[in-house]
């Protein structure tokens, strides 16, 4: 794609996305991502993170929603904890968790 005037700015993207119907956009995005998955057997999901909370509060809900039996689930360091590991084991998954060590100097 040629962009003779350069890449659109953050403000331009914000204006475009603010005018889209969020439900219709979400449905289209899900269908598009589904079409890309093909034989890779990827499972992708998202949930709204309510104001005043963070992604840690919705991760257990997302795990519960997805059919993960037999899958390999990867999570970043923010979700590496015993509770998430137990929940994933309960869904009959294998999982890879990122471990972050804080070094004090």
Image: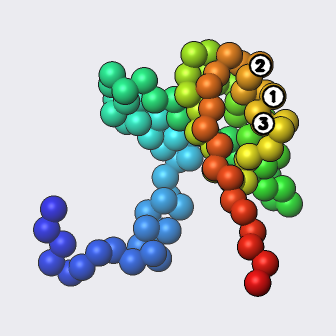
Q: Position of residue 64 (x, y in %)?
A: 74, 25
Q: Position of residue 12 (x, y in %)?
A: 41, 73
Q: Assess disc 2: are there few (<14), some (14-19) or many (≥20) residues with their C-alpha within 10 Å of its C-alpha.
A: few
At 33% from the left edge and 22% from the top edge, which residue is drawn?
A: 39
Spatial separation of the CA atoms under disc 3 and disc 1? 5 Å
Which residue in the protein does label 2 denote? 90
Spatial separation of the CA atoms under disc 2 and disc 1? 6 Å
Mark 3 and mark 1 in contact? Answer it, CB < 8 Å: yes
| Quadrant where the C terminus is found in the figure | bottom right
Residue 22 vertical placement versus 100 (above, below):
above
Residue 2 vertical placement versus 62 (above, below):
below
In the image, 4: left or right of 10? left
- Label annotation for residue 34: none
Which residue in the protein does label 3 denote? 84
Which residue in the protein does label 1 denote? 86
Helix, strand or loop status at disc 3: helix
């Amino acid at each position: 794609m040629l962009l003779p005037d350069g890449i659109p700015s953050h403000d331009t993207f914000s204006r475009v996305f603010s005018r889209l119907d969020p439900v219709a956009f979400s449905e289209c995005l899900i269908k598009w991502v589904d079409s890309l998955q093909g034989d890779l057997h990827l499972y992708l999901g998202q949930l709204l993170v309510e104001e005043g909370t963070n992604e840690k509060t919705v991760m257990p809900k997302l795990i519960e929603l997805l059919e993960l039996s037999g899958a390999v689930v990867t999570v970043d360091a923010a979700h590496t904890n015993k509770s998430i590991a137990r929940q994933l084991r309960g869904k009959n998954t294998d999982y890879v968790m990122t471990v972050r060590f804080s070094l004090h100097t």
